[in-house]
Amino acid sequence: MNDDGPQGTPRAVLDALRFYERAVTDRDNGSVGLFAWELDGSPLYLVRCTTDGSDGFLEVYDRDGSALGFARTYESCPVWTSRGVVRRRAFVGDHDEVDDQLADAAKRFAGAGP
């Protein structure tokens, strides 16, 4: 990716991508990717970061780079919360208020068979 990122990608999306590169990838703790889809003809951007463990982080943005949601994930089960809670965990890694919610979500997901 060049300094401007993929053509047309909003600055806020690139900033999120770079945050996870510094907080996780550069510290050799996982990987981050930028995904772009169209929803009803409008771009939708997802920044998805996974760690070498079972933690993950997800940020969703619209065509203008306006934030639509932030989640911490555990085994791909999301718990939607604030940007501050998500990014603090990515950077610092301390136990936080979302850990119990993630454990509950993972149990519900595992028990929700066909």
Image: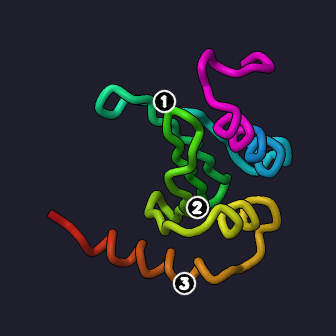
Q: Name the amino acid type tagged 2.
A: Ser
| Span highlighted in magenta in the image | 1-17
Q: Quadrant of residue 56?
A: bottom right
Determine which of the numbered discs, if any, sits on residue 15 in the image. Answer: none
Q: Earlier in the sequence, mark 2 or mark 1?
A: 1
Q: Is residue 55 left or right of residue 3?
A: left
Q: Is 52 part of what is drawn in magenta?
A: no
Say if 34 sits above or below 25 in the image: above
Give the Cα distance between marks 2 and 3: 14 Å
Sooner in the amino-acid sequence: mark 2 or mark 3? 2
Which residue is at the front of the view, 8 or 58?
A: 8
Q: Position of residue 31 (x, y in %)?
A: 68, 42
Q: Residue at x 52, y 47 (%)?
A: 60
Residue 1's place in the image compared with 37, above or below, is above
* Picture coordinates of residue 12, whole percent (x, y): 68, 39
Which of the two discs, 1 and 3, sits closer to the camera? 1
Figure colour scheme: rainbow
Q: The disc labelled 1 sits on which kind of residue? A: Ala
65 lies above or below 49? above
Indicate the secondary structure of the residue bearing disc 2.
Answer: loop
Q: Residue at x 77, y 75 (%)?
A: 94
Residue hosting label 3 = 100
If the image is split into quadrants, where does the C terminus sit? bottom left
**Element under label 1?**
strand
Q: Residue 54 has which mark?
A: 2
Residue furthest to the left: 114
From this view, report whether residue 6 is shown above or below residue 96. above
